[in-house]
Each structure stands twice: as structure tokens, then as C-alpha cells.
Amino acid sequence: MSNVLERFRSTSEMEFYQNAVKIRHEMSHFLMNEKNIPKRWRSIHAYPTINLVQAMIDEIMDANKIYAYTTELLHDRKQGFQNALNLLDHIYERLQGAMQDVWWDTLHIEPGNPGYKDRIRIEKHVEEIGKLLECEERLLKGCKAKSQLLKRK
């Protein structure tokens, strides 16, 4: 563990990958829990969303494998990160769909009513996942912008 305070720490080179793995972990645990997504909704919301997260990780890894020695390779690398950003937008849309289809009634329960604890639990998880997704978007945009031609030795 580093002794450097987080606010003084710069972004690591592979933080976009580590954050994507955190997203996959959180989404899998959240969406595959019976309390959060009933089994009848999993084929509509959980499985496709988790598959999108895995596809995003695959795009990130494919883009990161490209060493941009030519302008074509640089374009391919940037396009890979753009594809990952596009998948991130689809993940946002899937979560919004789940909020409307599955959790709409739960998210509108007033304090003091039965089920309010479920509302708090779901809001907490969705907020945490949202923060991870926003961080991933920022990291991917930064990585795409920092991509540049490499010089051969």
C-alpha cells in the first residue's frame, strides 16, 4: 500500500482496466442477487448488462494491446477506446431500463412505509455503480486523449 495521499496520487496507467473489473464485480453481485433482480427479470436486464460490461473490458484490453507506431494503429487504438465508451453508454441505458421496469415502485416508496429499506439498499448500490461508471468514462476519455504516436527505437 502506498503512503501517498490519494489526492496527491496520479492516475495509474491501467486504472481504467482495474475500474472496469470493479464495475463487472459490482454489477454481477448486484444484478444476480434475488433481492435486487428477480429471476424472471434476469434474462431481460441482468445477463445482457453483464455481457455488455464484459464486452467493454474486452474492447479495453484489445485497444490497450495496440502499440501506435503508425497513424492507422493510433486510429485503431483510439477507436477501441471509443467503442468501450459506446458500450459504457449502453450499460447506462440498461441500468436506466432496469430502474424503470424493475425498481420503479420500490424507488418511489415513501419513508416509513414497508419496503423503504429496499429503496435505500437499491439507491445505495445504483449510486455506487453510477460513480464507478462515471469514473470509467472519465478514465477512458483521458486514455483516448493521451494516445499518441510512439517512436521506434
Image (cartoon, helix red, strand yellow):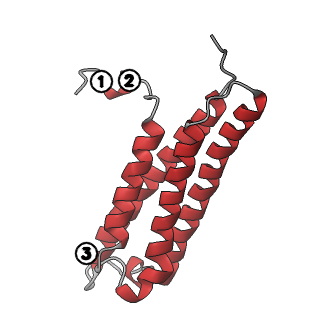
Most extreme residue toward the right, as rendered? 71
Q: Which mark is residue 5?
A: 1
| Identity of the residue drawn at 49% across and 59% down | 53
Which tag is nearer the camera, tag 3 or tag 1?
A: 1
Counting residues from the start of the chain, the first of labels 3 and 2 encountered is 2
Q: Which mark is residue 150?
A: none
- Residue 1 lies, with reference to residue 114, above or below; the image says above
| Identity of the residue drawn at 59% across and 58% down | 87
Q: Which residue is mark 2?
A: 9
| Identity of the residue drawn at 71% across and 33% down | 73
> Residue 54 at x, y = what percent?
48, 58
The amino acid marked with disc number 3 is Lys
- Residue 81 lies, with reference to residue 105, above or below; the image says above
Counting residues from the start of the chain, the first of labels 3 and 1 encountered is 1
Classify 10 Å Cα crowding around label 1: few (below 14), some (14-19), many (20 and above).
few
> Residue 63 at x, y = what percent?
60, 41
Element at label 1: loop
Element at label 2: loop
Which tag is nearer the camera, tag 3 or tag 2?
A: 2
What separation in Å lies between label 3 and label 2 (alpha carbons)?
A: 37 Å
What separation in Å lies between label 2 and label 1 (alpha carbons)?
A: 6 Å
Q: Give the side of residue 80 with respect to residue 121, left or right.
A: right
Q: Which residue is mark 3?
A: 117
> Residue 7 at x, y = what percent?
37, 26
The amino acid marked with disc number 2 is Arg
- Residue 147 lies, with reference to residue 112, above or below; the image says above
The amino acid marked with disc number 1 is Leu
Most extreme residue toward the front, as rendered? 153
